[in-house]
Image (spheres, helix red, strand yellow):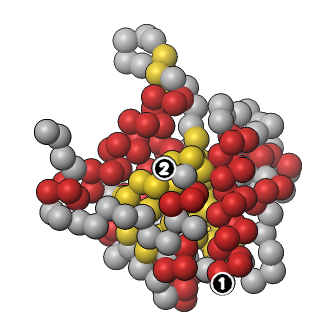
Amino acid sequence: MAKTLLEMAGANLTPTKLGEATLLLIDCQNEYRTGALQLPGVDAAMEEIAKLLAAARAEGTPIIHVAHKGQAGSLFDRDADNGAFMSEAATLDGETIIEKGLPNAFAGTDLVSALEAAGRKQLVMAGFMTHMCISSTARAAIDHGYFSNVVASACATRDLPTLDGGVMAASDLHNAELIGLSDRFAIIAETSAAVI
């Protein structure tokens, strides 16, 4: 029977509740809804993100919003609508915003300082894209002493070409990436209810 490394190590695989974690929302930007990188399932994922945000705010959970910052006139231009946060993920005063230029939200940013200020070692993570910025940030979190809980229903990705000239459906890539993360890098929560 197949087992993850976390299972083999006897780790507790119960997702961490928001009350004990920092909520890390990654790239909840219009680019993924109305821009060049429209994702299948983005609206359903944003409904889940809205639930996470509301619960975190009600509990006083630290919230960090990460935004990809692209070049002017390009993808994720922060001065244009495509680079702005989607309405469901609009920030409130006092919530931290981190801008990044690479997929890994730790690279070249002050995310570590923001997490140190929050004072919690567990992350509840959601956003876009599953195979890109979610994956690279969850993998890097371990290097900085943090552990991720990724909410599957609050993430999405896109179709990608396969090596043999076919297409991997976004849902298959999403699931494969979450399975890979679950081996060592993250606890996977199926829905927002698991961490609220």
Residue at the image position 17 percent from the left and 40 percent from the top? 2
Q: Quadrant of the C terminus?
A: bottom right
Residue 138: x, y in percent? 42, 59
State whether residue 140 is above or below residue 2.
below
Q: Which mark is residue 190?
A: 2
Relative to 59, 145 lies left or right = left
Considering depth in this image, is 4 or 138 the residue closer to the camera? 4
Image: 9 above or below 168: below
Q: Secondary structure at mark 1?
A: loop
Q: Which residue is mark 1?
A: 60
**What residue do we see at 60% from left, 50% from top?**
154
Report the front residue among 6 and 24: 6
Q: Label 1 sits on what residue type?
A: Gly
Which comes before the other along the chain, label 1 or label 2? 1
Determine whether label 1 and label 2 are within 8 Å by CB. no
Q: Where residue 114 appears, x then y in whole percent?
A: 56, 81
- The total number of labels drawn is 2
Nearest to viewer (mark 1 / mark 2): 2
Could you say which quadrant of the image residue 97 lies in? bottom right
Looking at numbered disc 2 in the image, what kind of residue is underneath it? Glu
Q: Which quarter of the image is occupied by the N terminus?
A: top left
Q: Which residue occupies the foreground of this view, 190 or 23?
A: 190
